Image (tube, rainbow, N blue to C red):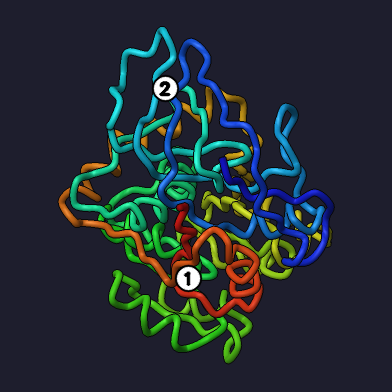
Amino acid sequence: MLAATVPSFGGPEAIVIAEVPTPVPASQEVLVRVRAAGLNRAEVMQRQGKYPAPPGGDNTRLGLEFAGDVAALGASVTCWRVGDRVMGLVVDGSQSQYVVVHESALAPVPANLSDIEAGAVPEAFITVHDALFTIGGLRPGSDVLIHAIGSGVSVAGLQLAHAAGARVFGTARTAEKLVRAKAYGLDVAVDVSATPAFDEEVRRMAPEGVALAIDYVGVPYFDRNLRALAPQGRLVLVGSLGGQRGEVNMALALSKRLRIEGTTMRARPFEQRCAAVQAFAREVVPLLARGAVKPVVDSTYPLERLADAHRAMEANVNFGKIVIEVP
């Protein structure tokens, strides 16, 4: 089968689409014929040698999410049948023609979604559903701040928070992304290129602060996130694209009794990843099925042009997901 590989770390030119053996499903595994796979910042960082796979993963294989159809079943699989349309997460290798996945790590693809749309769903919606509700405890009527509102994860989070009845504050570095986000439920837009002190704008609209902040940037936004939060608010760190080391205003965190938690789905124990997928299947797939939330696809690239897709992501111009079409 064809698979996206990185024999050695480097720029987009380091990506090689190679012939590799087709995997064979174990007893409780499903062999999925991949039709589409979303591209994530994590894969760009893996290609650069900055984001290693967890123990047991393969640093030379790219891809964390997929959508496709069941091609074969392990002997003990009971949840799925050959031909079922499915989507899910893996720790490596989804940008290939086939992938094996434990039956509990799969969710059904609603009939109203195309393969490309479904390929844009898992990493974004599973990650942010977990961050907003399982970790963040978001409640109807709450205020939530979501950074980098043009990213695939953030647009998914915006829609889920809006559907849950929250008021959504969002930041971006371009006015265009904020305007586009309005169509998906953004209530308060903050252009951080014009207003770097986003916490002041948040507090102007929500004097007590927001109940929850979802951040992908890290150190540059950390103190301002603490200032933007209400007493006993929660900060969920989903990424650290702007830096991983810096000073922390501990007095502010202590005095406001803030709760700060980091998360990365890829590094979690298998059982926790499966639990997150199953929560998504119960609570988000029905929303997708009736069109209450939608995957937002910025652009698509065939697998053989994966390097170009990486270049597009590194340019930071996408709104929503970049999706790889697998032949």
Element under label 1? loop
Residue 90 is tagged as none
For the residues marked 1 and 2, what is the alpha-carbon distance in whole angstroms?
A: 32 Å
Residue 294, picture quadrant? bottom left
Quickly name the residue at label 2. 103
Is 75 placed above or below 65 here? above
Is 287 placed above or below 55 here? below
Q: Callout 1 environment at 10 Å: few (<14), some (14 to 19), or many (20+)?
A: many
Residue 300, picture quadrant? bottom left
Q: Measured from the top left, where is residue 141 in percent x and y?
A: 28, 57
Residue at coordinates 75% horizontally, 51% vertically from top-left? 6
Q: Measured from the top left, where is residue 179 in percent x and y?
A: 37, 85
Left or right of 199 in this view: 137: left
Question: Residue pushed farthest bottom?
Answer: 194
Quickly name the residue at label 1. 149
Nearest to the observer: residue 249 or residue 58: 58
Amino acid beneath label 1: Ile
Element under label 2? helix
Nearest to the observer: residue 259 or residue 178: 178
Question: Residue pushed farthest left?
Answer: 290
Residue at coordinates 41% horizontally, 77% vertically from top-left? 205
Left or right of 315 in this view: 34: left
